[in-house]
Image (cartoon, coloured by chain):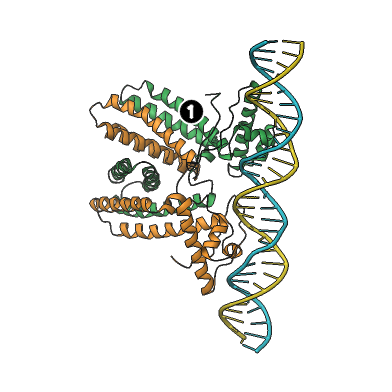
Chain colours: A green, B orange, C yellow, D cyan
Amino acid sequence: MEGRSAVSPQQDGQVASPRRAPSQQRSRERVERMLAAASVLIAEQGSDAMRMGEVAERAGVSIGSLYQFFPDKRAIVWALAERYTAESQACIAAALKDVGDAEGLRQAFSELVDIYYRLFLAEPVMRDIWSGTQADKALRELELADSRANAEFLIAVLRRLRPDADPVALETTAFLVWQMGEAAMRLAISVDREEGDRLVAAYKRMALRELLAE
Amino acid sequence: MEGRSAVSPQQDGQVASPRRAPSQQRSRERVERMLAAASVLIAEQGSDAMRMGEVAERAGVSIGSLYQFFPDKRAIVWALAERYTAESQACIAAALKDVGDAEGLRQAFSELVDIYYRLFLAEPVMRDIWSGTQADKALRELELADSRANAEFLIAVLRRLRPDADPVALETTAFLVWQMGEAAMRLAISVDREEGDRLVAAYKRMALRELLAE
DNA sequence: TCACAAACATGAGAAATCCTCACATTTGCA
DNA sequence: TGCAAATGTGAGGATTTCTCATGTTTGTGA
């Protein structure tokens, strides 16, 4: 999980200018310090507000050194994200490795979700990196308000169809179903059309099962 | 849906400097042109690459006029997003208004999802605004790859538990369940803790039902 | 041990972009 | 018609990312 090669994500098909991978002990330590500094700053103010100069200063290196190992600002965020995903993947693989029956899956999955949830709650950096809808708070709030409003329409229907159900549970279900729908759409449009169609169909089935037959 | 007040989202508790709402016919038309120009540019290159100078030029106004009605760059994106949500909310309300029974819900919901899906596919601006995980392509790809890798572990388990199920369906289910989990987490951490816990629990139930008893 | 190439370090400043502001023009109204 | 409010303008201030010419350190082969 350590010592992976120099970071160089790309964007828009533009290949980021190549950067050197640290080969000496000294520079490897410095790169660690840079990432640690970035991590602190992201936790404090978000990756958008993180300034390259501040990262360099906090890491005790010059701005030039920063750019020696990271082609641009996003590369730093990307490097941190990559570590998190690598760590969590290992964790997930371990948890699911020895599942043998349905009950085992139920337990393993449940624990996994709890771990992920706690991780998200505890790690501001993860929260920032995967925060969806940009780091833009105004947009995120608009999206949330929209989801709630839309869920409200669903709740009204559900209350009519199942007047004896727990209102709070209905609300939770409707909100979740709606938000997941948006996630499913986003996923569907970022894969090829055929798989996208399958995913949307699967979501529909899943959501309706939940809405109708709780 | 037209003629709403001047746009001023805020960020980080910082109140964006107030901007005038267009009160004359002339300026209302100009604001429309600004939004139209922004829309074109976002569709072409994404909101991140959109330049304020370009928006002004394309709208045939000066950069100063742009800032007369929008406090900053994000406000333009926000204004477009707000229109989309208002439109889709009206559409959703209409579709769910007269649902009377389970079959009606099934139909209405199914149609709604189709409409949304087509909208996402057809509207690059919507895609860009709600693209999740920032406009950063590298991050989005990392997230996708991560989700696929994680789904793979789930698929392995499912194949063992249900060897006679359709492999493609299993893959779709696992991928979707995983991606929705991340969506559920993001949602859970952006509401208060109590509701977050409920949402995570509901997701767990939903996912397990899907994974175990398809 | 020494010389030398490759790796590493530095920070002034080039380039790009957002946004402001002082001033000019137009509009609506008494 | 005259005036205040609304609107329009664009040069340039402020900020930030990233480059590059130059200097320093490290490892290595003779």
Q: Quadrant of residue A104?
A: top left
Q: Quadrant of residue A202?
A: top left
Q: Which amino acid, mark 1?
A: Ala
Task: List x then y, in percent, for residue A167.
Answer: 37, 48
> What chain is tagged by disc 1?
A
- A179, above or below B8, in the image: above
Task: List x then y, in percent, for residue B129.
Answer: 46, 51
Foreground residue, B134 or B103? Answer: B134
- Determine if residue A58 is in view: yes
- B62, above or below A91, in the image: below
Left or right, D1 with respect to B122, comes to right
**Quadrant of image for the C terminus of chain A:** top left
- B191, above or below A9, in the image: below
**x 52%, y 24%: residue:** A1
**x 29%, y 33%: residue:** B170
Left or right, B192 with respect to C15, comes to left
Q: Which residue is mark 1?
A: A86
